[in-house]
Each structure stands twice: as structure tokens, then as C-alpha cells.
Amino acid sequence: MPTDGGGAIVPFSGEPGQASPAPPPVRHIRHGVAPPISRVFISWSSGNLLQVACLRQPSPEGGGGAEEVGGRVVEVNLGAGGCGGVEVEEEFDAAEMRQIEYGSVPAFALLQSRKNALTEAAAMSHAPSLSEHAEWWQFVLEYSKTIGNLLGNPDSPPAFTLEDPKTILKVPRDKFLFLSLVIQDFDSLLSKESTVYSNLSSFQKKLIKLQIVEDDPDYWNGLAAALSVGWLDIVVNMLRFHGSYQLDQMDNREIENGLVEAVAVLVSTMPRMRPDLPSGKLGQCCKTRPDFIKGFEGMHHLAQKCIQLKPSSGTNGLTDLLVGILSENPEVVLAECTNNFGPWFVTHAMELLTADNDYADMMLHEERPNFGGISIEELHRIVYAQVLCSHSLTWQISGIYHWKHGRKGDGVYWFQQAHDKVRLDRIAQQLFERIGKSVTDDSFKQWEGLLELLGSDIGSAGGLEFLHRYRDFKRSLQQAQEGRTGEAAPQTAEFLIQLMRNPSTPQRFWLPLLHDSVELLNCKPKPLLNVAETTLLLNKLQELSLAKLHPDFSSNHLPSHALNTVRLALASNLARAILEE
Amino acid sequence: MADNPSFRRHPHPFSIDLVRWLPSSATSPSDRLLAAAVHDPSVASSYIHLLPLADPSSPLASLPLPSRATALRCSPSALAATTSTGSLHLAPSSSFDAGAAVAVSGGAGFHVGPVRGLDCGGEEWVTAGEDGRVHVIGGGGDGRVVARRVWDGKGMAGYEAAKWASPAEFATGGAGCGVQWWDQRKGDAPVTQCSGIWGHGLVTGMVHSIDIHPSRKHICVVGGSSGTIFAWDLRWPQQPIPLSGIGLHGIVQPVCESEVWEVLFDTYTQSSDIISSTSARILPVMICSEDGILAVVEQGDERPLELLAEPCAINSFDIDTQNPSDVVCALEWESIGVLTRGRDAMAEE
């Protein structure tokens, strides 16, 4: 598709071989991305929706303008607005279709749970495959009826009628019903052969009384029934009863008679999947499935020619589907469904396909390496789910999205939900380094919230654990200074000792910690730290003084006399402690 | 007394994000109104619709919004909505037209990003957004509104819910920061906070909704992620009382396992234990959840009363303060549900 710099995407709908193609319709899309646009991606979404993604080159300044739009995805509805080209008959509007989809979920879920229950029961009792289960077939019929009802038209014709194919084929509700009915019909016909026989014999009795045979629906029902069970000779005989054969009507109904005779001939040469036929029986024997398909397709082609003599609209999709069904070719059925109808139809039709067809069941459930190990059924379900999700305008909120937009709290929450340890570690690391640089009250308050969120088990080398302890210490210190509870001071001292003892406490925090505690150390009347503890602190202080001589030592924000203040406080504390003991 | 709730589902061509009863002086059922925040996915536009209870599918009036609504509240005098772009819109209840509506636009001066905490308290409104900011909005006279920034968490915390307790106090809750209590007489910072109860080995959870009973202002009920519902009694601020949740083995049964979107004290359901209803007991609470449950939860061993179990999420609900037997809810699958409890249900049918 050609695009121009002005941001107009032009759908090109000329056909090869046309003498002078009409000027392609132009559709302007407002994507709001400032030029230069470096990339445009186009793909079809569901139905008439086209998804266009416009991206611009990220600016070299990095986080220059937070307000600048780096890219946008736009959905263009080509169906509405008369853009020309294909004319689509809007059978259901989008909202109606969504309501149908919503309604179909409980039925689908029920069928799946029933399937699972029966499979489990069958596995336990070593019963034959699912399709042999009488109950199972009942469930499938119930399911197809529910879905059919959702599509409207609950009073569906019970049998295959040739009368008016147009009504059956016009709207998708009937397409689904047609599909389910054909499958149902075969089952009901095949499983009740005696009924077919009794139908035909009762019709035979009627025959004597009937004037115009072809007006009686039982005639056609009988024909279809006999055809489906392969009683070709009966079919041909019945066809010859057709009114067009009457001599006195020849003039008006010549074409009709020709058609009926053609059908009779076709029926008599119908390909049949069997090694041989008893003599006198009609039909062409095909020993293998491919031969059968070939023969069937040939017949289908001839039948189509007949149909074309009597015009009817848009039956192609459906007859291909019918061929697929009759030839028990689930691949064809699926392909036709996918081409002609939406993913919703495919997902639900699949349930019917696999209901009584072991081959279909196996084919659809087989794991396919070219799909990444999933089966065709799963693939279609995923596609369907994708289509459903793409309609929902609630975007997946990720931790990264929140974090990038400055919502650190939300970001961490979502990372935690996703068990994204890598990112949480990185945040913890950043936090640690940031606080490590300057342990002022203000900056710490800012990060306290984040610390709370992260919890204490994230972070390497116990870094966050230290921060948590430091936070506890600070809180306790504040309480002690406010004189709120009498226990605060000893508690704070406890925290201090724990921190100073802990090998994971980085050295650069020692002096700040001690400096913060000076007031605590000078508390009256009793010293809070005993001799051993004070000695420990003095040792640490000594270590620190030595380290200060080291050229690498980074001095922090504390005043220059901080070390001395601490030393003095500790010394006096030691003195008092010794006196106490 | 057997309750036979009647439930009616009304499909709507748009997504219903939030739904509220509109307080009115009308007593007859045909005059009662609903306010719904809706979103039309086909053209990506959002509105507040005024719907009659008799026919909730056809709006009487409509107020356009710049982006999708994230909070909606109705007070006797006005209707307020906040959006995902951080704007606030106030419309007087009497005349619902775009001209009379007042807006505070989103941006650096107000809120950046979605604002989900919104509540009306007498004359003032409180907003709390995912950007970590809290504002109190009051009328500046002659139709103007003035927004005062109470707090700026600078993104450290993101607020999801806000609720007034008294003209000076309110509660907020958010992602990972639990719940906070604010008292404007004691300064701008939160007075007390509680990280809440999140079972199942979760470090933090997200608070989605808070409600405070009008006659027991020291007790908040909080609903959040993972089906967690707890009560926060300010007299014991670090001991939240669990009402429901997963992973709280032996303490409470979970009424649902997914996000609890909204909680409300249910004034219709009598507490089953009236005799010993001391002030320490938590009154019945109604909740709606992502897994399609609408239920009433009580403290103690009482089993939760499940009113609805839908195949789709229930995103929002409201109990009519004037007729507490009636509950309206917003279903994920583009429909509004109206639930009527009590003997009146039979008469209406």
C-alpha cells in the first residue's frame, strides 16, 4: 500500500488486467504523531477494521519531552463511510454481535465442563471414545440449539429443503443452523434407518392419491432421506415421478424436466466409497478416499452447472462448505468457515465438527510443532480470544508503564504481581545507592513509601534489609525524642546495636548512625548502653577513623566535628556504664 | 421473612463503567433516575448518561467527557465525575446540561493520570489520584470551584479510593500503601495508616474502595485485590479486622477470589445478630467483584449472602439510599442490572 508523507493511507483496490483503474479512494487518518514518521505498520483487525501503527524515530535527547507522542496505533473502520470497494452486507451490527458472543460463553463453558466430566468418567471405566456416548450427543445438540437460538430464528425448518435456498443462505444465523442441521440430519437419518424406510413406505401409500407429487414436502424429504442413506435406485425412481415427466406438460417444463433427468443421471453415477456394488445397483465405486473426493468434486461441479441454470445468489461459500461436510473433510470445513465466517463461528462450529468424528477430533487436537506445539483447536481459540481482547479498550497495565509515568508505587505493585524479580532487584539496588549517598531526613521520607512496598526479601546482599532496619531505627529514635513512650529509648539503642553489629551494614552508614544517636547516648539518668556495647561502638569508631585516612574515603554531609562529638558521647557513656556496673 | 430478589438485565450498546442512583425527591418508581458513566468503543468517546429506571437503555440526557470516567459520585445537589486524564467534572443535579457543568482540567496543576478516589462531603469534594496527589475542592462562590492541593506523594503512592468521614476527616487507600486517615484540623499529612490484611503470601495489595458508615465514623470497610475485604477501626489502627480474603486460612472464608471493585455498607440487610450488636461489630457490607459476584458479607461465622453470580465481571454497583432494597449494578458485558430485594419485588412484577 502506498503511503505519502502527509499521513494519508491510501487503500489500493485496482484489479490486475483492468484497463483504467478508478482513482483509489483516499482515507485521511488522524494519528497525532508529529513528523518525521519513521515506520508505519498495517494489519487487519477483525471485520472491516484496519490497524495502523505510526511510529516516529525516538529523539536523541532521550527524555526530552515527556509530552511528545512517540507513536500511536489507530483503528480505521473501512466498512462505514462508503469507502468503495467491497460492499458488505451488515448482518449484525457490532453491538449486537458482541451480545451474541457474551451469550454464547456460558453454553460453551457448560459444554466443555460436560466434555471433561464424560472424558474422566470414560477414562476411569475404560469405556470407548467420547463420541459413542449417547449422553454426549445430547449435550452437543443442546449446545447447537442454544447457539442457534442466540442467532435468532428458533423455528428452523427441520429438514433439508431445496425449495428456496436463498432464504437459508442469506443470513449467518441460518448458516450456523444449516451447518448444525446437516450434521444433525445425517445422524438422525443414519441412526434411524428404519424411520427412513417407514417414511418412504408411508409416502408410497400417499403416492397413489397425489396429483402433483413435487408439491408435497414429503416427496423431497423422502428423496433427501433415501439419498443420504445411499438408496440411489429409489431416488432415481422417485425422481421419475416428477411432474415434469408428464407428457402433456412437456412444452412448459422442458428445462425443468431436463434438470430433473440430469439429477437422476448424476445420482446414478454418484461416487460411493465402497469396494464393489451388487449388480443392478447404481453408483460408481471408489476404492479409496481420494478417488471418492475426486469423483464427488466432479459431481459437485456438474451439479453447480445445473444450479446455475436456475439462478440463485451467493451460494458458493456454502456449497464448498457442504462438500467439505459431505466428504467428511474437517480441514475443508474449517478452511471454509475461517474464510467466510468469523472466528466466533469457527470456535463454535469446531465443537460440532468433533462431536462424532474421530478423525476430526484427532486432527484438531493433535499438537502441531509448526504452531509452537499447540493444536488447531487451541489456535482458533487463541485467535478468537485475541479478537475479543482487541475490542476491549482497557489496556493491560504493566508495571513498566506506571513506573515510566512516575507512578512508582503502582509500578512496584504491578512488578510484584508479575513476580518480576529482576526489575524489583534493580529498583532495590537503585534505592539503596540513592539513600546511601545522603541519609538526610527529607530524602529518606520520600523513599520510605517505596521501601514499604518492596518488602524486605528483595535486593542483593541484604541491602534492603538494612534499609528496613534503618527505618525502624529512625522511627524509634523519633519516638524517643518526642518522649512518647518510655520504651522508645532502649528500643532505639537496641536497634542501633543490631545495626552496628550487622556485617551487612555498609561502613558509610556508621558515622551517620552514631551521629544520630548522640542525643540518645547522652540521655539521663542511666546510660542506655552497657560496657560491652559501648566498647563495640568505640571500636567501630576507631575503624572509621582509620578508614578516613584512606584516600578513597568519601566524606558525607556530616559536619567535620561529627566524629569528635560521637567520640565524646561514647566516652562519657562508657564512663557512666563502668560506674553502673 | 423470605427475600425473593428480582433481577432484571438491561443491555446497553456501550460499556458501562460506573453506575449510581441519582438522589431525587421523586417517590414513584417511574421517576427514579440513574447516572451511568459509559464508553462507546466504536468511536472511543465517553459520556455520563442520565437514565430512567423504567427504561435504562435509553438516556434522557448526556454529558460528554474528555476521556473515560474513572469515578462517579452523586450528591443531592451535584453529580461529579473524574476521568483517566485527571479532570474533574461537576454538574448540578437540577439541570443536566453541558453548559452548566464546571470542569477542572487534568494536568500539572491538578491531577496527572487517572483519578479514582472521589467523594462528596457536604460542601466539599475530595479527589485522590494515581499520581499520589490529594485535592480538596470547594465552591469559590459564584459557580467557580477551587481546588486545594492537600498532599503530593510525588508518585510514591498511587491512590485508588477516597471517602469522607466528617467535614474535616477523610480516608484514602491505594496501591501498596494500604489505607490512610487524614484530618484537616491536624495538618496536611496522614494522621494514621494501616497496610491492611493481604493473605496468601502477598506482600502488598491494592485497595479499590472504601466506605464509612454514616453513624459509625470511626470504622472504614475496605475492599481490594485478591478478594480482600477488611474493616479498619481507628481505635485499634494496626489491627484491621478481616471479613473476607484468600489465604487467610481459618480466619475467614473468601466470598470471591478476584478484585473487589466496590464496597458499601448495606443498610437494608439486618445484622443477623441484633442482640449482641455492640459497637465493636461490623455491620453488613455489600461488595461487587471481578468474578461476577454481588454479595453481602458479615463479620463472624455468617456465610456471605450471594445475591448474584454472573458469568462476567460486575464493575460497579450502588444501593439507593432512599430505597435500600434496590441495587443497580454495571455488568462487564455491556448491560445494567437492577436488583430488587424484599416483598416489593413480587408486587412490581
Image (cartoon, grey):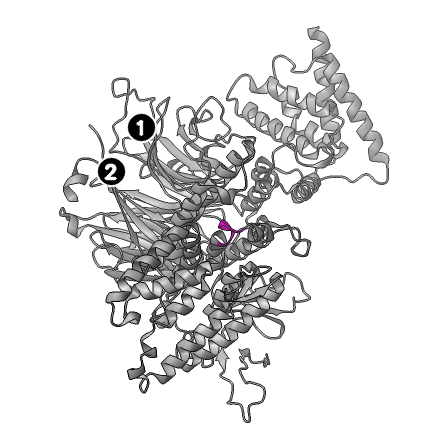
Total labels: the figure holds 2
**Sequence order check, earlier mark of 1 and 2:** 2
Rendering quarter of residue B236: top left
Horizontally, is A134 left or right of B9 in the view? Answer: right
Of the numbered discs in the image, which one, if any, rests on residue B283?
A: 1
Secondary structure, mark 1, is loop
Q: Is residue B158 visible?
A: yes
Given the image, on which type of amino acid does mark 1 rest? Answer: Leu
Given the image, on which type of amino acid does mark 2 rest? Answer: Pro
Picture coordinates of residue A72 (x, y %)?
55, 66
| Residue tagged 2 | B5
Q: Residue at x 73, y 12 (%)?
A: A531
Mark 2 Cα shell of 10 Å, populated few (<14), some (14-19), many (≥20): some
Of the numbered discs in the image, which one, if any, rests on residue A48?
A: none
Q: Residue at x 48, y 70 (%)?
A: A268
Which chain's residue wears label 1?
Answer: B
